[in-house]
């Protein structure tokens, strides 16, 4: 009887997880299917998991300016990779210094880190700092510096570094290891779960960022992928809304793959970044629970 109850509970749990997984996967598959569906078939037959009329017109329209798309991909990949690495480096170094009792004015520095969690200066001071003081407007570095440090991530890393035994640090010092070497050879390797968790969140933030480009970027060569795709969708909406004003353009405007293009932009936007999750999944639970809970 007990075995039957255990078997029944396992079946229920597995069915719940299967249902949750399908709830996450099916919308993504539907988006991919819509992006490969002909626009006329989409309007007549609605959304289908298997396209009734297969078409790549949406991707052809998105890649009609292939040079711009490739430049945007290059900018976004560079910003995401470099920004994430610099964020992890600066965040971990700051967090590690806050855990060392021998650091001078450690409490004052901790207060300086805590304050941004409660108070935010706003957009205007940030704009003045980046444009008039640092002179980073219309440069690729402005896309990186806005997410370079996060107070929340510093606190998570700080709590994670506290889990490292003090005896391990002292042993390294007795063996003649410098503070920099101890940090890079001992502290960072032991912090892989926390680094992987924070790194994925930061990479997603960099990858999905379009607001920074809309505020500080004017050169077409420096526009990231998300900003370019948003501009593309705005252009489609503008053309469709003004189709009635020009009879000569009505036929061509009506053929624009509006819904398919929207789904194609979603696939292009989430495709590369979603591949990172399976590689970092094993670090998630440990990185979040130890870094965020243990004090």
Image (cartoon, rainbow, N blue to C red):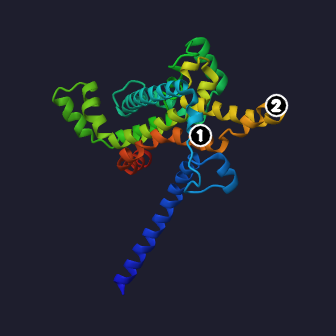
Q: Secondary structure at mark 1?
A: helix
Name of the residue lying farthest toward the left:
175
Task: State the image quarter where residue 85 is shown.
Answer: top left
In front of the other: 56 or 134: 56
Q: Are marks 1 and 2 in contact (CB under 8 Å)?
A: no
> Residue drawn at (67%, 22%), measured in percent from left and top?
124
In front of the other: 213 or 295: 213
Establish if 220 lies above or below 273: above
Judge whether residue 265 can be spotted in this image: no
Image coordinates of residue 184 in percent, x first then y, are 28, 30
Q: Earlier in the sequence, mark 1 or mark 2?
A: 1
Image coordinates of residue 95 in percent, x first then y, are 40, 33
Task: State the image quarter where residue 1 is shown.
Answer: bottom left
Task: State the image quarter where residue 166 is shown.
Answer: top left
| Mark 1 vs mark 2, CA separation in Å | 23 Å
Image coordinates of residue 114 in percent, x first then y, are 52, 34
Name of the residue lying farthest toward the right:
245
Residue highlighted by disc 2:
246
Count of marks placed on residues: 2
Q: Secondary structure at mark 2?
A: loop
Label 1 crowd (10 A; few <14 / some 14-19 / many >=20): many
> Residue drawn at (17%, 30%), measured in percent from left and top?
174
In front of the other: 151 or 193: 193
For residue 58, the mark is: 1
Image coordinates of residue 45 in percent, x first then y, are 67, 56
Judge whether residue 54 can be spotted in this image: yes
> Residue drawn at (35%, 39%), measured in percent from left and top?
161
Label 2 crowd (10 A; few <14 / some 14-19 / many >=20): few
For residue 30, the mark is: none
> Residue drawn at (59%, 36%), measured in percent from left and top?
118
């Amino acid at each position: 009887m007990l075995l039957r109850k255990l078997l029944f509970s396992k079946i229920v749990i597995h069915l719940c997880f299967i249902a949750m997984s399908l709830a996450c996967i099916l919308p993504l598959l539907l988006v991919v299917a819509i992006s490969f569906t002909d626009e006329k078939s989409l309007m007549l037959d609605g959304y289908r998991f298997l396209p009734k009329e297969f078409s790549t017109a949406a991707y052809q329209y998105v890649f009609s300016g292939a040079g711009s798309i490739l430049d945007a991909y290059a900018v976004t990949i560079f910003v995401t990779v470099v920004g994430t690495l610099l964020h992890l480096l600066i965040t971990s170094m700051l967090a590690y210094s806050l855990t060392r009792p021998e650091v001078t004015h450690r409490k004052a520095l901790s207060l300086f880190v805590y304050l941004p969690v409660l108070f935010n200066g706003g957009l205007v001071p940030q704009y003045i700092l980046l444009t008039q003081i640092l002179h980073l407007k219309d440069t690729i570095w402005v896309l990186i510096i806005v997410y370079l440090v996060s107070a929340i991530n510093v606190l998570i890393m700080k709590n994670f570094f506290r889990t490292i035994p003090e005896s391990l640090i002292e042993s390294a010092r007795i063996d003649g290891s410098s503070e920099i070497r101890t940090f890079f050879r001992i502290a960072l390797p032991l912090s892989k779960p926390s680094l992987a968790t924070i790194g994925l969140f930061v990479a997603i933030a960099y990858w999905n960022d379009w607001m920074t480009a809309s505020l500080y970027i004017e050169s077409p060569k420096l526009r990231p992928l998300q900003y370019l795709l948003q501009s593309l969708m705005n252009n489609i909406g503008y053309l469709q809304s003004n189709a009635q004003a020009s009879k000569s353009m009505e036929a061509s405007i009506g053929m624009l793959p509006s819904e398919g293009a929207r789904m194609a932009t979603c696939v292009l936007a989430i495709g590369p970044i979603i591949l990172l999750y399976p590689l970092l999944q094993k670090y998630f639970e440990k990185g979040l629970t130890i870094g965020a809970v243990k004090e």
